[in-house]
């Protein structure tokens, strides 16, 4: 792995605070209400190379996000590509996906 990519993945994994970090070829989705990849209460997605991490603010949100994102190709997980900024899970909840550029990163 490119050293710069490896360092970037390590930094974002640390900010996410979920187990497993980036796994090549996979989307790692975990729960962390204190994740620093997005504002509190939001879902966060970071895609670097061929791996992504997604954080959910609570266990219920993780289940809903897993359903909402299933079948979405990895390269379409970030807002600038295909996923809308607001991901409406159901009528009662709306989780916002933050892109690193939204956070000044």
Image (spheres, helix red, strand yellow):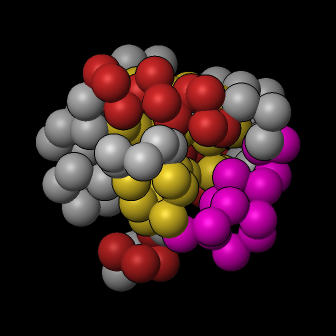
Q: Position of residue 47 (x, y in %)?
A: 63, 51
Q: Position of residue 104 (x, y in %)?
A: 35, 81
Dividing the image into 4 quarters, which one contains the N terminus? top right
Q: Residue at x 54, y 69 (%)?
A: 85
**In screen coordinates, is 29 left or right of 104?**
right
**In screen coordinates, is 74 left or right of 63?**
right
Q: Residue at x 36, y 32 (%)?
A: 61
How would you classify the magenta stretch by its main secondary structure?
loop
Q: Nearer the viewer, residue 8 or 78?
A: 78
- Viewer can see residue 17: no
**In screen coordinates, is 41 left or right of 85?**
left
Against 66, residue 50 (above or below) is below
Dividing the image into 4 quarters, which one contains the C terminus? bottom left
Looking at the rendering, the stretch of residues picked out in magenta corresponds to: 73-85
Against 82, residue 70 (above or below) is above
Q: Nearer the viewer, residue 81 or 16?
A: 81
Q: Position of residue 51 (x, y in %)?
A: 69, 38
**In screen coordinates, is 83 left or right of 10?**
right
Against 74, residue 27 (above or below) is above
**Total numbered labels:** 0
Residue 96 placement: quadrant: bottom left
Q: Residue at x 83, y 42 (%)?
A: 73
Q: Is residue 76 magenta?
A: yes
Q: Residue at x 46, y 22 (%)?
A: 63
Q: Is residue 19 magenta?
A: no
């Amino acid at each position: 792995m490119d050293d710069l990519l490896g360092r970037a993945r390590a930094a974002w994994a640390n900010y996410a605070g979920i187990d497993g970090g980036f796994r090549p070829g996979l989307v790692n989705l975990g729960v962390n209400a204190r994740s620093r990849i997005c504002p509190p209460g939001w879902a966060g997605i970071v895609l670097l190379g061929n791996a992504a991490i997604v954080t959910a603010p609570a266990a219920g949100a993780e289940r809903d996000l897993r359903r909402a994102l299933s079948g979405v190709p990895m390269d379409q997980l970030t807002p600038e590509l295909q996923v809308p900024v607001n991901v409406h899970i159901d009528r009662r909840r709306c989780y916002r996906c933050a892109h690193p550029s939204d956070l000044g990163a």
